[in-house]
Amino acid sequence: MTKYVYDFTEGDKDQKDLLGGKGANLAEMTKLGLPVPPGFTITTEACREYLSIGTEPGDLRVQVTMALRHLEDKTGRRLGDRHDPLLVSVRSGAKFSMPGMMETVLNIGLNDASVKGMAEESGDERFAWDSYRRLLQMFGKTVLDIPGEVFADALDKAKATRGLANDLELGVEDLKELVTEFKGFIVEHSGVDFPQHPREQLDMAIRAVFNSWNTDRARLYRRRERISQDLGTAVNICTMVFGNLGETSGTGVAFTRDPASGKTGAYGDYLPNAQGEDVVAGIRNTLSLDDLKNLDPDSHRQLLRVMRRLETHYRDLCDIEFTIERGKLWMLQTRVGKRTPAAAFRIAAQLVDENLITMDEALARVTGAQLALLMFPQFDRSAERVLLTKGMAASPGAAVGRAVFDSPTAQEWAARGEQVVLVRRETNPDDLGGMIAANGILTQRGGKTSHAAVVARGMGKTCVCGAEQLDIDVVAKRLTLGSTTISEGDEISIDGTTGEVFAGAMPVVPSPVATYIENGLESALADADAETADLVKAVDRVLSHADAVRRLAVRANADTHEDAARARSLGAQGIGLCRTEHMFLGDRRSLIERVILAHSGDERDAALEALLPLQREDFRELLRAMDGLPVTIRLLDPPLHEFLPDRTELAVKVAVAEATGQTGDAVEADRKLLHAVERMHESNPMLGLRGVRLGLVVPGLFGLQVRAIAEAACDLVLDGHDPRVEIMVPLVGSVRELHIIRDEAEAILAEVTQARGVVLGASAPRGQHSLSVPIGTMVELPRAALTAHRIADEADFFSFGTNDLTQTTWGFSRDDVEAELFVKYLEKGVFTISPFETIDADGVGRLVEIAVKEGRATKPGIKLGVCGEHGGDPESIHFFHNAGLDYVSCSPFRVPVARLEAGRASVI
Ligand code: PEP
Ligand code: MG
């Protein structure tokens, strides 16, 4: 019999796959002897079974009965009993936390009879009826799919007609009326009575949690977070403890360190006389842990002790949910907490200083994506500003955009290219689409643990929450503060690092972390405040450690000396790809056009001759900028037609000339040009005359480039520089192609070096200048990968062109598929991320592995790198590390991220 149900005493924190994050950590806390209410977890496997067969697996019912009886024996109470009933919560808990995405039902076990037993036992009739009211509301919404507003509106109306501001002021009779009303809604909307049988309530709630795995918003969230759609959720059934039993009770959320800034010291929100999700929902404003200390010093002390214990045990920032029931502390959840990028770096460094983790672990605790976020610009503090108000700094960054007041508008405006800031009174999971589309999120209500804050932090999106002074009217689509009004479409700026909200668009400046990476520690610390200095130093420590431990070198893809210099300042250790076709854009295009259209060898030679000095200068500047570091220059790659005029435009021009009887040299030239363009037209240019094929078809073209490279390098050597140029041949599929080009290139290199008195080769006799120019190839066609053992004979290095390799392995046109087709493919789960973004390890990656193995078998010392876009993608970098490459090459701005991830790949 498959075991589908685990008591909290059975599991541990390493069983997240089976028990989900919440279940595994509840079990761990139980094991640690912390005060966790008894309960049990239904496994993710049961959920997967349920979702695939459409009903609960047969054994599950029996196992739930056994676990429930055990729970009843332990607590000495019966589920839903008419005297002193046992009540349970039913909560989802997937392997990866998905805040607010899935369902929870509290107070299962209450019915018309047990509500009275509960009132008697607790001595608090109001509490019992309030709990019943909550059950009906949550059950109606979550299990029976009745719109939440049906209940919320009735609750608001009940308060309004009685002139009350707060739920807590509703009396017993009011709540009884609401219960009757809610039961009526349930019949009206679902066609069935609210189930009075406790076990039926439990079974329905479990099913609802299973089903909540597949709601649209949960699927969307997982797609965005790259969580597999197949994991399923566990379900935790936990004895209810009550934070709504009067003023000596309450519920809260806390962090062992500040998850926004990373500052040491416990941080949290507490809501007295409240239950479950009230804190996270941000409905009432919360108290701080210091306030709790004044209210209930004993529980506060105990809470801090538990938090310290958890942090020592997990050796990381933990977040927790707790409830205090009449002065007794209960732990309802813990996990290693989400944090902002700044907090991640600061906490990693702090934990090293506290001797809780090693530097390797610190490196593993941060990510390249977090570093990238820290490099974003911030608001210019010296600029003139109109400070509207200050809310809570919930998720850092500087966001500027037009104010929008609902999620659909945010999505619609963003889709047409507008920058927007989503302004809401508070957010709920239905706002997810708008939150993704917006640059930033601003809310009026809720603390740092509200839905808006938690979700925004998870997305790395700027968020200011709890800006209470603002009056946000989502119906009229405006916010007001005193005499200032910001309406839909007006510009607004929010600072998620300070909580400030500004009217208008604030200018932004570079972040201190970007300044540090580009200009060094001293310059970044020059006028930094203590917190910024702490962050910059933490980044420096972790990034330096990454540099020290990584095996992969990091190069940049750069085509100009300006880009190369930038890349170098960001830590690039060379250029892995200079795309020389980018040197022929604009004015120079016509020079290539002349080469292609030449009628005779002489004409072509003259055209090439004109190009030579330009190319020589390009290469000289590039090599000078990277003096002493390797620079891989790729010979021309793009399809020929890219250098010719547009076929349709030219055809129209010629047709007009003919129709209007124009004659003369210009018309004749156009006609010839059209003829040439038509001759060269290709249906699939990406698979046509490009790369090495071009070099073989157009005599002298590659030769010209090799000559320019050789001359530039010799000039620099003779000037006392140290150029380390490498020549790369693109789109090779056969060793023969490479062999022909290599022969030609070697002859030119020999000729140029000899003419200038430079010795070609690694070592020269004393007093003589030498130049060594490795010649290698891109591996970007499946055939190249599959014949790597032969190609390696002719290549000093391979550089994997994973853009083309992905295109040709999958047969996807890289310029066309990403728009329509991939949206569908992602939706249907063919892949969770575009293979052009993250390497498809099983297919394209396998070709890389084959080429690495076979290339090295032929030539053990062959240098191996990657220069496709994947070279800057964190997950792909880990793949390339494991595949045994020597370097990755990526766009200059991704170099710091690649350095960090290459380091992480070495320690994870
Ligand atoms: C590649 O194909 O991966 C590559 C780097 O070359 P390009 O993107 O220029 O085709
Ligand atoms: Mg390519």
Image: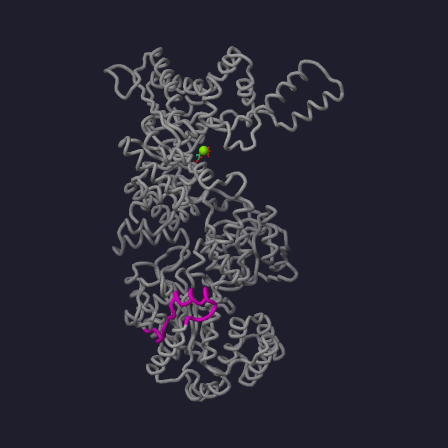
Q: Which residues are magenta?
A: 35-57
Asked which quadrant contains residue 722, the reply is top left
Name the quadrant where ligand 1 sits.
Answer: top left
Q: Is residue 513 visible?
A: no
Can you give x and y, in whole percent of width and height, for residue 883 in the image? 32, 41
Compared with 625, 844 (above or below) is: below
Which residue sits furthest left? 766
Residue 490 pos. (x, y %): 62, 51
Q: Left or right? Give the position of 688 relative to 25.
A: right
What's the image's color scheme?
Answer: one colour
Q: Is residue 315 magenta?
A: no
Which of the two residues, 443 or 789, is positioned nearer the viewer here?
Answer: 789
Residue 484 placement (x, y as % from top left)? 62, 56
> Is residue 42 magenta-colored?
yes
Total marks shown come to: 0
Question: What residue sits 73% from the left and 17% below the top?
Answer: 662
Depth check: 671 or 790 in front? 790
Q: Give the residue displayed 59% in from the left and 21% down from the top.
A: 676
Q: Is residue 831 visible?
A: yes
Query: From the viewer's perspective, is 554 left or right of 418?
Result: left
Q: Residue at x 38, y 55 (%)?
A: 262
For this orientation, the residue located farthest to the right is 660
Is 500 located above or below residue 874 in the figure? below
* Image quadrant assignment for residue 548: top left
Which x, y percent locates residue 657? 72, 21
| Residue at x 36%, y 26% (from the top left corner) | 726
* Left/right of residue 646 with respect to residue 655 in the rendered view: left
Is residue 673 placed above or below 359 in the rendered structure?
A: above
> Quarter holding the N terminus?
bottom left
